[in-house]
Amino acid sequence: MYDVEKIRQDFPILSRQVNGKPLVYLDNGASAQKPKIVIDTISTFYSNEYANVHRGLHYLSNLATDKFEAVRGKIRTFVNAAKEEEILYTSGTTEAFNLVSYAWGVPNLKAGDEIILSVMEHHANIVPWHFLRERHGVVLKWIEPDANGDIDPQKVIDAIGPKTKMIAMTHMSNVLGTVVDVKTICHEARRKGVVTVIDGSQSSVHMKVDVQDMDCDFFAITGHKLYGPSGSGALYARSERMAEMRPFMGGGDMIREVGRDVITYNDPPHKFEAGTPGIAQIIGLGAAIDYMQGIGMDAIAKHERELRDHATEKLGALNWLNIQGQSATKGAIFSFTMNGAAHPHDISTVLDQRGIAVRAGHHCAQPLMDHLSVSATTRASMGLYNTIQEVDSLVDGLHLCHEFFG
């Protein structure tokens, strides 16, 4: 049985008040709160276990290295990669996609080659490909969602042409909550020799991920959305693709030998992890993954479907609220505008006075805002600790906004 009240006790911040009201945190799509086990793990590491990794032979360095490297195995299991060497540590999905752009894209793409992506992408999965467009003449081809916010996988497949070399696609939209059938896309892309880059920033938080079954080449996750520390994340890179990549950054630990006239590189994954990493952040991410798997990804997904269904019913009954994206399989992410004079920033401010934290703006998805013909939306995004009562609090707050702004 999913005991959400017991889970909430694991998150210290959820017991606080904001503006004299109990905190209702519905900004999980931007960043999730941290359970005590993650906070304690990081504190213990800095207080009693800290040393640099891969550098020394003393006790603390060996301990830190063992804890740091153990997380690679946890992430491998979490996304079901074939081997640990396919897991590269990053500071988050932004670094992951830039790594793919520079380490794989630059040496393997030339002017006129095409990258297919959707207008639903987060800027992190757009801007690195624009770099290739600006600097190397790569062509970007855009896929638009339908009226419900769904991406038809066949539409993506049909867009593959003789010059298509890569598909960059979100697994779950951070704005609409749409879950994209990336498995169908990736299987057909592999058959046609097209590399696939999948943004798992949202999906990995809300559902089981299996990169082998998905058949993708790259898959990125970010720690701060996974109830872990900011500055942590990972990139799954298929071994065949990794063999085609050149180092992204140069420095310590990614080399085997450095001379005046020669340099040899370390083996993957260290070949792509230059310098002193975010040791505490990665160890904290490992604790967060342990925490989520302790609850169970299927149990989390079931709880969030119940939140989604309740929110769909309650928000859908507000005929003055315009919900963006009505996909039948969407996650518990709701972006909306309100009829009348209320700007999304106004809505967010009024809700904040009631202790309700939501996000307002373009959500780092300006091409999608243009497609929807809006400048911004208010977004309520739910996580494993949110409750039905909190959804009702959101609805009550929106009634107040509507009465106030008319």
Image: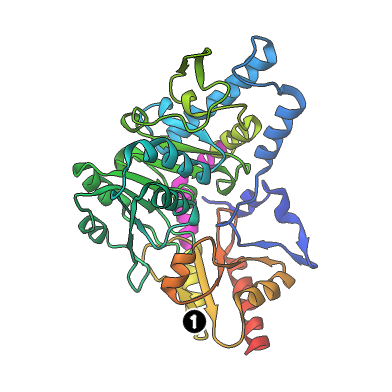
Residue 295 visible in image: no
Which residue lies at the image location 49% right of the left edge and 58% below the top edge? 304
Residue 298 in magenta? yes
* Mark 1 element type: loop
**Residue situated in front as seen by the camera: 216 or 391:** 216
Q: Which residue is mark 1?
A: 317
Q: Position of residue 261 (x, y in %)?
A: 49, 14
Which amino acid, mark 1? Ala
Q: Position of residue 299 (x, y in %)?
A: 47, 49
Q: Position of residue 294 (x, y in %)?
A: 53, 39
On the picture, is 216 further left or further right than 403? left
Could you say which quadrant of the image residue 351 lies in? bottom right
Q: Residue furthest right?
A: 20
Could you say which quadrant of the image residue 145 lies in? bottom left
On the picture, is 398 further left or further right than 156? right
Which residue lies at the image location 41% right of the left edge and 72% below the top edge? 371
- Which span of residues is magenta-colored? 290-306
Q: Residue furthest front?
A: 261
Which residue lies at the image location 67% right of the left edge and 46% below the top edge? 10
